[in-house]
Image (cartoon, grey):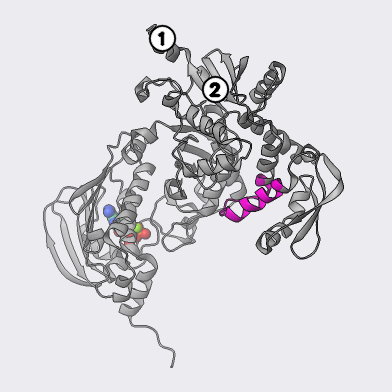
Amino acid sequence: MPIRVLPPDVAAKIAAGEVVERPVSVAKELLENAIDAGADDIQVEIIQGGRRMIRVIDNGCGIAASEVELALTRHATSKLSSAEDLTHIRTLGFRGEALASMAAVSRLTIHTRTADEESATLYRMEGGAPSQRENQARPRGTTVQVENLFFNTPARLKFLKSDATEAGHVARLVSSYALAYPERRFALHHNDRLVLRTTGTGQLFDVIVAIYGLDVAEQMLEVEPREGQAGITVGGYISAPSVHRANRQDATFFVNRRWVQDNSLAYAVTEAYRSLLPAGRYPVLVINIDLPPEEVDVNIHPTKREVRFRQSGEVFGAVQKAVRTTLMAQHPVPNVATPPDWSSSWRHQQMLSRTGPFTAAQTRMAMEIQRTGDVAPLERREPADQPPLTDTMSVARLPMLRVLGQIAQTYIIAEGPGGMYLVDQHAAHERVRYEELRAQHQRAEVVSQELLDPLPVDLTPQQATLLGEHLETLSGYGFEIIPFGRTTFLVKRVPATLVDGDIAGALLEMIDAAMEGGEGFSWEDQALITLSCHTAVRAGQTLSTEEMRDLVRQLERCDLPHTCPHGRPTIVHLSRDQLEKEFGRR
Ligand code: ADP
Ligand code: MG
């Protein structure tokens, strides 16, 4: 075939395909235009998941009657005038192609009026061709309505999912922008049913309540915005480790108030939560990253959902640090009366059985003590009754505790300024060991010991492949393991603390975890977790008062004393207030 320049309508459809993939892409462009127009009241309405209709109504600056056609022309924008402007973009839009793209694949109506115009303009296009223009009254602002999306590109239509799925994407989008702009009001209706409304109070917390409900909101910790290196400021809200989800859907990131979906950012945050959440669970968070516009390139993706940082290391570091600092400063000791929702978690049960040292009865007991009601007849307290997060029991470090004794050879009972504390001896020691080992590893000081008799370990081919790839990593933790036949390995040296432990068991545990582990899995961290578990004092072991005191002192010195490396609580608290209530003293 000879080379030909494509007819404009074909070129327009192709270009539209880059920007408009499904109803949520339309909603996104319209919402961004409304925000750029300075609107503080933005209503989104969709019908049948948006395939029938998407309408965004705003009270922004409006488009002058003389510029309406221009706004619908490809590469026509009021937000950019030179290539230089591209290096410091402060608006969400700048490519000038969204309206043109949408108009090419739908029936699009704009109804708009600026503040100093007498009358409003109504302008309609059908598959990219003008079909109607008239004056029709409306207050200042703009309504853009997109109907019959993809009516002339049936291939696209086929890729759309159910109405509920498409509407779900739009709900996620509107929620995200509401989180990014707490000072503006947003509403979303699907098939005339109100899905979301925010009130524009300017408080991010209020938007979090509107989206996630009070229960979750109350367990969110504020990341106080502080300007760090390279003018990077990180703020927002992150969930306490008691709240977690099965996927990363509820991790929302904004860069200069632009919603971005960036895997490396999500990964940076998951790392900051490492060892605080059970395996395969993710936090709920809203993170605002602000930095000078020239530090970030927003022009790398047609729908602008990805960005590139000039100094990405600095940005990820700042995010990680902000999250970590917040967790360490505010993570409360779980309260006996309001335990984290652990017992219902299937993974948790699995994990309990995997940590090994518990007997069935002890496991049951550990679960029960977290389920409160079964241990002590305490009422579940209403949220309003809860002490604020800055109360004595929620400081980053543990308070000084006075050891009183041991219960069921598993829990240390102690008194502190805030009342009574129960420490799970195994979980606590795991945390202590974990931080010790990590420090030793960082200083390359892991003490390794040669086995008198090298230990052969037989594996399945899959296990052998996995282990074979990570011998190097494990050597950093004191293991010397060499291949010994196709699927057998010979263990020659181990970390000194493991010499008398179950060496094969520890190795298998790491390999199993690696097989199960998803994208966030790290051998380094798993090695630390396994070693701390296998070398920690077990439940069911009688401890002397001296040993208990030592353990509690060591726990007090930990960076993150409140959970074991698997994410289970190390300590639960019964406040004096609660005791007094229970005994009818108040
Ligand atoms: P871009 O947002 O990249 O500039 P669009 O095609 O989305 O490109 O919009 C083209 C122009 O139309 C914008 O630059 C803006 O001037 C105008 N416009 C679009 N939507 C609105 C709106 N809701 N309110 C005011 N002006 C708008
Ligand atoms: Mg735009």
Question: Callout 2: few (<14), some (14-19), or many (20+) C-alpha neighbours within 10 Å?
Answer: some
Q: What residue is pinned by disc 1?
A: 583
Q: Name the quadrant containing residue 362.
A: top right
For the point 39% across and 68% down, the residue is: 18
| Horizontal relation, residue 127 to residue 98: left or right | left
Q: Earlier in the sequence, mark 2 or mark 1?
A: 2
Residue 57 shown in magenta: no
Seen from the viewer's position, the closer of residues 491 and 13 is 491
Range covered by the magenta-colored residues: 505-526
> Disc 1 on helix, strand or loop?
loop
Q: What residue is pinned by disc 2?
A: 395
| Horizontal relation, residue 411 to residue 202: left or right | right
For the point 52% across and 20% down, the residue is: 393
* Residue 48 sits above or below residue 291 on the image: below
Seen from the viewer's position, the closer of residues 33 and 81 is 33
- Residue 427: x and y in percent read 61, 32
* Ligand 2 image-quadrant field: bottom left
